[in-house]
Image (spheres, rainbow, N blue to C red):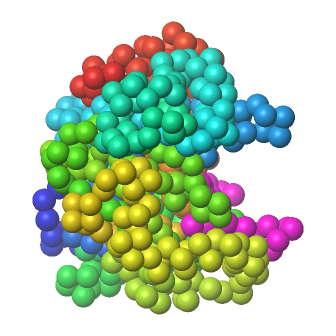
């Protein structure tokens, strides 16, 4: 979406206000406008463009999280069996996203799908006898589900050299390793997708988009509506805007805005900011030898978001390889935020949660300190576990986006870290906020339908139902229990999104 500064002033009242111009707000605004084009909707984005923070391509892993390769979604039970229930849920959620994007293409709301989604194999890779046995059992469990029936497994070096030549180069023939492969995987540029949706909203809908406008507070009114202080960052103008329904999709800034709303559901929530860094190469010789996303096991005490992976990325038509992520630390809640974000987020309502989460995650604190202190040479050494002959001059260090991990109340520990994505809604269904990180953008459509189910249940299952089924044909059905429907929705999205698989 082009840089476009509006001279319009926001109206004093809207039916719906969406805070933040990332994938979540763009998705929710598009859904609501499709359901009811007469709704008066405004989006306020503090920067000059949609998708400049967590949704931006370089700030986002872009995996198209479909649980094909992320091993933390398939834990091993005490009896040795593999639990694939979380993996099935996330795979289904990503299929919901693909159906919605296919609908947008079909309606000509957005075009050129290859500018935001491309086929890219998703692989899991493990080393040693123990993890090889785990991966074998995982493959057996997963291939019984319609969602993962095409998954391949191999321990054969010759086959693995076909799949991942860069990783297998100079590897000892006696080394024990195993991999699974799903050709159905994708690489997604969520920044490009969000800007396409933003352009549609700006030019072809009644949704009003205000760039360089920052919402400072969200206050409840006695009549049940919400009053926001909105600052025009260009013209230094401040005004108050009232809305019946508010969605806070402001990335790391969702937490302080949610806190300002004083809803009881927000009590006890805190946030811990974690930044990431990638080793990146554009060397065409290296890129040509690695046409997949390859995930392995997280190291001991590492958070799930730090699972090492070597990914093919396609950003603005150019291919690159990313290795990481390496954890970084900043007290900012957004990449373009303030160093006071973390200290200012601490209050009497979340102090116990924050202290409890810190006290019971001291190994994680130690891990983060070690990560932050690493030199580039030490990071390259980690890369050499994947790419044996990696040369330091081929790789550059790139800072990714800020993530704010959720800390919430816990009766046992006082507070605990949550590594997922969470939707917080008040009891009246008039305000909702999205907190957390992974799988985040990949499941944006499911997350925003979750918001609508909690906040507009009668309409969603009443007058909006036919439109909902037009957009998401599988809505309300479990793909994991329906092989035929799984084939149908995948064939539909393959055609519309111009995917290879």
- Name the image quarter holding the C terminus: top left
- Nearest the viewer among 149 and 241 is 149
Decide if residue 264 is on the left or right side of residue 443. Answer: right
- Nearest the viewer among 130 and 357 is 130
Q: Residue furthest top?
A: 484
Decide if residue 327 is on the left or right side of residue 277. Answer: right
Magenta region includes residue 407: yes
Count of numbered circles in the view: 0
Compared with 490, 100 (above or below) is below
Q: Confirm whether residue 354 shows in the render.
A: yes
Q: Which range is magenta? A: 405-429
Q: Residue at x 66, y 32 (%)?
A: 133
Q: Residue at x 20, y 82 (%)?
A: 234
Residue 107 place in picture, x, y as percent: 24, 29
Q: Confirm whether residue 458 shows in the render.
A: no
Decide if residue 22 is on the left or right side of residue 454. Answer: left
Q: Residue at x 82, y 71 (%)?
A: 413
Magenta region includes residue 460: no
Residue 48 place in picture, x, y as percent: 22, 70
Residue 291 place in picture, x, y as percent: 29, 37
Q: Residue at x 39, y 77 (%)?
A: 375
């Amino acid at each position: 979406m082009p840089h476009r500064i509006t001279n319009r002033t926001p109206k004093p009242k809207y039916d719906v206000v969406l805070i933040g111009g990332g994938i979540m707000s763009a998705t929710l605004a598009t859904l609501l406008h499709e359901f009811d084009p007469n709704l008066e909707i405004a989006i306020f984005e503090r920067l000059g463009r949609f998708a400049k923070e967590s949704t931006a391509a370089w700030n986002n892993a872009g995996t198209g999280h479909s649980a094909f390769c992320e091993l933390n979604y398939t834990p091993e039970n005490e009896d040795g069996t593999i639990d694939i229930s979380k993996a099935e849920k996330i795979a289904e959620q990503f299929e919901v996203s693909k159906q919605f994007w296919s609908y947008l293409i079909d309606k000509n709301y957005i075009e050129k799908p290859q500018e935001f989604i491309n086929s890219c194999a998703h692989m899991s890779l493990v080393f040693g006898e123990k993890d090889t046995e785990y991966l074998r059992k995982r493959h057996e469990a997963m291939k019984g589900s319609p969602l993962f029936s095409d998954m391949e497994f191999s321990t054969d070096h010759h086959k693995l050299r076909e799949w991942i030549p860069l990783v297998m180069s100079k590897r000892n023939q006696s080394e024990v390793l195993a991999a699974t492969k799903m050709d159905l995987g994708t690489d997604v540029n969520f920044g490009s997708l969000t800007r396409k949706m933003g352009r549609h909203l700006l030019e072809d809908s009644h949704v009003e988009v205000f760039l360089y406008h920052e919402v400072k507070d969200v206050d409840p009114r006695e009549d049940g509506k919400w009053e926001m202080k909105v600052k025009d960052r260009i013209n230094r103008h401040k005004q108050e805007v009232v809305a019946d329904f508010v969605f806070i999709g402001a990335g790391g800034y969702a937490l302080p805005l949610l806190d300002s709303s004083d809803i009881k559901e927000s009590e006890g929530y805190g946030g811990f900011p974690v930044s990431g860094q990638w080793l990146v190469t554009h060397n065409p010789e290296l890129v040509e030898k690695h046409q997949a996303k390859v995930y392995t096991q997280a190291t001991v005490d590492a958070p799930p978001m730090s699972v090492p992976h070597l990914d093919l990325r396609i950003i603005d038509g150019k291919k690159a390889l990313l290795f990481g992520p390496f954890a970084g630390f900043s007290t900012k809640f957004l990449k373009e935020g303030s160093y006071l974000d973390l200290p200012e987020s601490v209050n009497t309502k979340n102090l116990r949660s924050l202290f409890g989460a810190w006290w019971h995650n001291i190994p994680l604190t130690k891990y983060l300190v070690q990560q932050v202190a690493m030199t580039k040479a030490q990071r390259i050494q980690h890369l050499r576990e994947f790419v044996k002959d990696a040369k330091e001059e081929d790789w550059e260090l790139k800072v990714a986006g800020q993530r704010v991990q959720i800390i919430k109340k816990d009766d046992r520990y006082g507070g605990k870290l949550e590594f997922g994505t969470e939707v917080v809604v008040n009891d009246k269904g008039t305000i909702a906020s999205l907190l957390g990180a992974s799988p985040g953008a990949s499941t944006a459509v499911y997350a925003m339908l979750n918001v609508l189910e909690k906040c507009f249940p009668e309409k969603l299952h009443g007058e909006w139902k036919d439109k909902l089924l037009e957009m998401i044909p599988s809505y309300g059905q479990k793909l994991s229990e329906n092989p035929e429907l799984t084939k149908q929705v995948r064939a539909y999205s393959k055609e519309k999104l111009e995917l290879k698989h």
